[in-house]
Image (cartoon, helix red, strand yellow):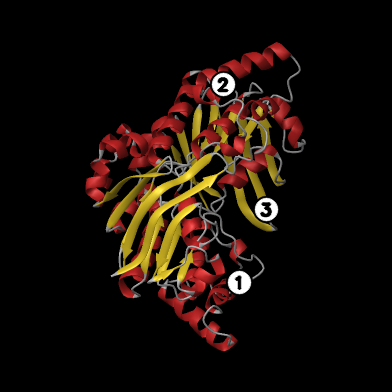
Amino acid sequence: MAEHILEIQNIRVRYAGLPVIHGLSMNVDKGETVCVLGSNGAGKSTLLRAIMATQRTFEGKIFFKGNEIHRLQTEDIVKLGIIYVPEEKMLFGPITVEENLILGAYVLEDKRQIQHNLDFVYTLFPRLKERRDQAASTLSGGEQQMVAIGRGLMSNPEILMLDEPSLGLAPILVDEVLDTVGRLKKEGMTILLVEQNVREALGLADRGYVLQTGRIVAEGSGRELLDSDLFRSAFLGI
Amino acid sequence: MTLLDVQHLTKNFGGLSANQDISFALQRGELVGLIGPNGAGKTTLFNCISGLHAISSGKVVFDGEDITALKAHETARRGLARTFQIYSASGDLNVEENVMVGCFMRTRSTAKAKARAREILLELNLSDLGNALVSELPVSAQKRVTMATALGSGPKLLLLDEVAAGLNPNEIEEIMINIRHIHDDLGVTVMLIEHVMELVMNVSDRVMVLDYGRKIADGDPKRVAKDANVIKAYLGERFVREHGEVLT
């Protein structure tokens, strides 16, 4: 059996003192795109924060390539190649697009590698190249999302975790952002995706997990989930 | 009967024109959707109408009065309320107290504000949450509390800024029921910015579209959804292909 690149065993996590995740287990294999679905408050973002250790896991274990990581510091987890693109994007508004991107490569030392990654990001998002010298705060919502994803790609991630990348975007930009995720998947990137655009997300993903009040209540391929009664009542309102 | 009349409104930020020569009118009792790509100037337009931004040129008339030069607290007193994309209520107050903040616009009596807040929470199916801290609520409930707070100020016109973003279909349905109640039963005129097309197409009498700070379409929702410029700037061919049922 192939070793999972990411394996979560029975974790419990609190947020603001309240238990949010109660004994959750899941895994991601190399090259897979796995999506996590669930209502607001189900614990999706908390799960990603627990993996990054910005939220403490007080029970259970998280393994990355077979090594325990839940007691590491966040910066060490980033160095291992786990990258989190938060829902709030958290760009540095006053500095340029290119400066924001280069900050994403702070764990790399090889200048040529950084330039290579920058070229890759500009190939993926030609619009960012056009706007490289503009302050990030002057970009539209869709473009800012591209910068956030691009910044995540700058450090050669082994797994890219995206938290609702299409939130608050116009329909045409939702397409664009999810197309990008599809392109990264084709490039062989391992992706953990939290999304509210359930149909599109499941269309992209190899597998999905459904999170409800801090527990996994269903898992399966996109098709299996879309057909399950639980899922249809919880997400599609039918 | 015209409630809001916006005439040639322009708002420049330095060299950037966020709203360019926008004119439209809202009739009393209308429910109008405002859509457009991110960065098109939708929230800026709300900010200009409500007096949060001073406009560069043009005129805003509300309920027969020129409110162009008025500040946000002054337009609110005249019956123009709005919600914000990012919830800005006090997390230390519970839901009922947050709604009371809105109610104090119309009364100085704590007892009256409390009574009115309870009525509103009942009307919006939020009574169960009255004692909860807003910061502990899921996003969908927080958004509905912002609508309740705005409603507390007794508005004639309610501007809603992306109340359905990030919600699942069941939560969108709850918000839709609230919006319909505010509009249909309480008689409030509503303008809403939204990317969730299920909501926009379902509730709007009329849809207006902004792109690069200009109005590019305005009219019947179904007709606007078929407009070539709107598809090109906002909806995208794929959305129309895959979600066409939402637009009819």
Residue located beneath label 1 in the image = B94
Mark 2 or 3: in front is 2
Q: Position of residue B3 (x, y in %)?
A: 35, 68
Crowdedness near tag 1: few (<14), some (14–19) or many (≥20) residues, C-alpha within 10 Å? some
Q: Quadrant of the N terminus of chain A?
A: top right
Rounded to the nearest angstrom, the CA distance separating label 3 from label 1 is 22 Å
A86 is higher (above) or lower (below) than B67: above
On residue A121, the disc is 2
Residue located beneath label 3 in the image = A14
Tag 3 subunit: A
Residue B31 showing in the rendered view: yes
- Name the side, left or right, on which A91 lies relative to A222: right
Residue at horizontal 57 percent and vertical 49 percent from the top: A43
B9 is higher (above) or lower (below) than A186: below
- Name the side, left or right, on which B69 lies relative to B135: left
* Precedes in sequence: disc 2 or disc 3: 3
Q: Secondary structure at mark 2?
A: helix
Q: Label 1 amino acid?
A: Asn
Rounded to the nearest angstrom, the CA distance separating label 1 from label 2 is 45 Å
Q: Report the number of numbered marks.
A: 3
Q: Label 3 amino acid?
A: Arg
